[in-house]
Image (tube, coloured by chain):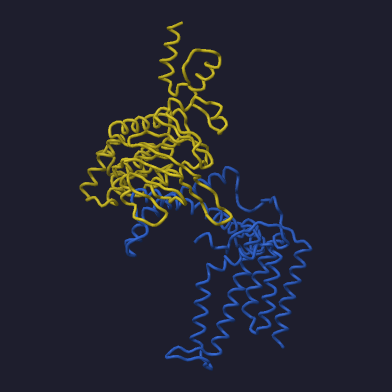
Chain colours: A blue, B yellow
């Protein structure tokens, strides 16, 4: 189950998208999200779909891999589809007992599903093509103008990368402790809600203790290597915009203009 | 009562690009009351094997029968099995969670459905077996005692379930020398007194040679060697090939024999080697 979630997973490959500056990808994703919520007409959707398709092909991430990512949100998609299908007022095209499907509902349901699908595909492209480190670097750089008003950009980015770094460790640890307690006869699977919640105590207490200990160790290790926050810190990989990013921004402006113009038709 | 594996394989992440074999076609039979040492490089499938015998992992193919219980790939209730087979994980002190040591050790027995009184008895017995002072420690927090004692508490937590098979994954890792030898002594006497089947994973050849009567060498998910301890360390080159080493004393005996000294074999323990050397010297 956990393995099926491709949102937030990095797919290493050598593509144009992978080589883009993470700042470009972050900004582009933000604008992409906005655009998905302005599009209304089918032709606008077509343009947006074309844009996503182009990016998927450019990214060299296997289409199968992307579709597997969609599978984990299938439930949400179907839920949104059903709600829109049955509960939108308008001209009925089908009626049986209390169930009524309207023309508007059908249209809205389809549009909503396409919109959500595009949204997930577009945003997961960002995390699929940039490693967590690149992303946090990008976020730090994008937020650094706000340092002047006291926003701790470096610290936030550092916290994010540490958090991301320890997700797999924590999962592994959970698995290990769970097995150890199961070997002692613990039962995490059956029983009612309260019994199940209680059964989690032998899992959560050791996890918390280990996490605090690990945080402590990490802090010591960072101090031992003279970490003292962002000021005066240089980087191994300096983020630099190239001609590729300029082209990416141009394409993005093109998409905006296209959607705007098609909306005027 | 015994443990039998027939062509057991286990695949991690089957059907994905990350698929790897944890166990490959492993066949094995362990009799009741044996003391088996499992050695092998990291990632050779030792822990995977132990987890199968406890039913925490299910075989992807093959047959597995433990203490008369058939373990299949399907969901089944394994509480009977867990009652009979105790598994102590690596660094088991990380699984402690209760307010007091006695409560923590009672966790297993209570899960088995014993009454509080019975569980208390088991706790007392287990603490005595593992060498912890019941009266002194029972009401203390498991988080304020030393590392070696924590380890003992964790092992007592498994012993309190009164298993007929006890499996330990690197039980002495991270302990100081005194803690090591004490723990090994305890395990040895447990094995003798209660005739428990012992299965131990260790990276220390000396330890494994001193406690087990049979040695299994694993590599890449397969059993590469399965011999009684008296014969296990004969083929030093084979061990080196597998990226392992023999006990220091076996290596000394091996080198002595290569130099033409009249020793029958590479003894696995210092005691045996000492006796042999004394005999040879007297003879000369």
Image point 33% across, 32% down: which residue?
Answer: B186
For the C terminus of chain A, give its image quadrant. bottom right
In-front residue for pair A238/A147: A238
In this rendering, is residue B184 above or below A136? above
Image point 61% across, 66% down: which residue?
Answer: A66
Residue that sits furthest to the bottom in the current view: A91
In the picture, measured across the screen, residue B67 lies left or right of residue A235, that is left
| Residue A201, quarter of picture | bottom left
Q: Is residue A211 visible?
A: no
Q: Is residue A76 visible?
A: yes
- Residue B151, horizontal then vertical, whole percent: 38, 39
In the picture, measured across the screen, residue B270 lies left or right of residue B41, that is left
| Residue A5, quarter of picture | bottom right
In the picture, measured across the screen, residue B52 lies left or right of residue A52, that is left
In-front residue for pair B194/A40: B194
- Residue B130, horizontal then vertical, whole percent: 31, 36
In-front residue for pair B67/B178: B67
In this rendering, is residue A11 above or below A105? above
């Amino acid at each position: 189950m956990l393995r099926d979630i491709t949102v937030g997973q990095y797919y290493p490959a050598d593509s144009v998208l992978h080589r883009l500056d993470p700042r470009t990808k972050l900004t582009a994703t933000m604008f992409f999200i906005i655009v998905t919520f302005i599009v209304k007409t089918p032709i606008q959707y077509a343009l947006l779909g074309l844009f996503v398709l182009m990016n998927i092909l450019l990214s060299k991430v296997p289409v199968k891999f992307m579709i597997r990512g969609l599978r984990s949100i299938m439930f949400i998609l179907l839920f949104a589809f059903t709600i829109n299908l049955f509960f939108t007022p308008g001209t009925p095209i089908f009626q049986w007992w209390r169930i009524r499907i309207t023309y508007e509902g059908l249209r809205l349901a389809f549009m909503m599903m396409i919109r959500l699908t595009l949204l997930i595909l577009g945003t997961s492209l960002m995390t699929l093509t940039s490693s967590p480190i690149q992303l946090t670097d990008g976020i730090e750089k994008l937020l650094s103008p706000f340092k002047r008003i006291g926003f701790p950009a470096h610290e936030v980015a550092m916290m994010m990368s540490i958090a991301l770094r320890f997700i797999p460790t924590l999962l592994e640890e959970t698995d290990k402790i769970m097995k150890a307690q199961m070997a002692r006869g613990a039962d995490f699977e059956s029983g009612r809600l309260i019994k199940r919640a209680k059964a989690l105590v032998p899992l959560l207490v050791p996890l918390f203790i280990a996490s605090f200990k690990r945080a402590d160790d990490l802090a010591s290790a960072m101090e031992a290597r003279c970490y003292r926050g962002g000021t005066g810190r240089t980087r191994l990989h300096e983020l630099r915009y190239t001609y590729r990013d300029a082209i990416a921004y141009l394409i993005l402006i093109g998409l905006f203009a296209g959607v705007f113009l098609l909306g005027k038709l | 009562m015994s443990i039998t594996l027939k062509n057991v394989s286990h695949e991690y992440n089957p059907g994905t690009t990350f698929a790897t074999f944890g166990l490959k076609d492993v066949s094995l039979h362990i009799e009741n009351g044996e003391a088996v040492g499992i050695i092998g490089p990291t990632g050779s499938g030792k822990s995977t094997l132990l987890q199968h015998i406890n039913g925490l992992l299910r075989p992807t193919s093959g047959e597995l029968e433990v203490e008369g219980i058939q373990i299949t790939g399907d969901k089944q209730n394994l509480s009977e099995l867990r009652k009979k087979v105790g598994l102590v994980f690596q660094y088991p002190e990380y699984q402690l969670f209760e307010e007091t040591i006695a409560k923590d050790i009672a966790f297993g027995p209570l899960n088995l459905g014993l009454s509080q009184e019975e569980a208390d008895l088991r706790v007392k017995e287990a603490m005595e077996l593992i060498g912890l002072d019941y009266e002194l420690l029972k009401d203390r927090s498991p988080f304020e005692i030393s590392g070696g004692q924590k380890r003992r508490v964790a092992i007592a937590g498994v012993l309190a379930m009164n298993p007929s098979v006890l499996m330990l994954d690197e039980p002495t890792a991270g302990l100081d020398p005194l803690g090591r030898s004490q723990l090994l002594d305890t395990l040895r006497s447990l094995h003798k007194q209660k005739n428990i089947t012992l299965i131990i994973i260790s990276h220390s050849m000396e330890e494994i040679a001193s406690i087990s009567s049979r040695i299994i060498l694993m590599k890449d998910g397969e059993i590469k060697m399965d011999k009684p301890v008296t014969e296990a360390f004969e083929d030093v080159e084979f061990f080196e090939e597998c990226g392992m080493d023999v006990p220091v004393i076996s290596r000394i005996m091996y080198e002595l024999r290569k130099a033409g000294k009249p020793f029958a074999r590479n003894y696995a323990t210092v005691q045996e080697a000492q006796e042999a050397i004394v005999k040879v010297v007297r003879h000369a």
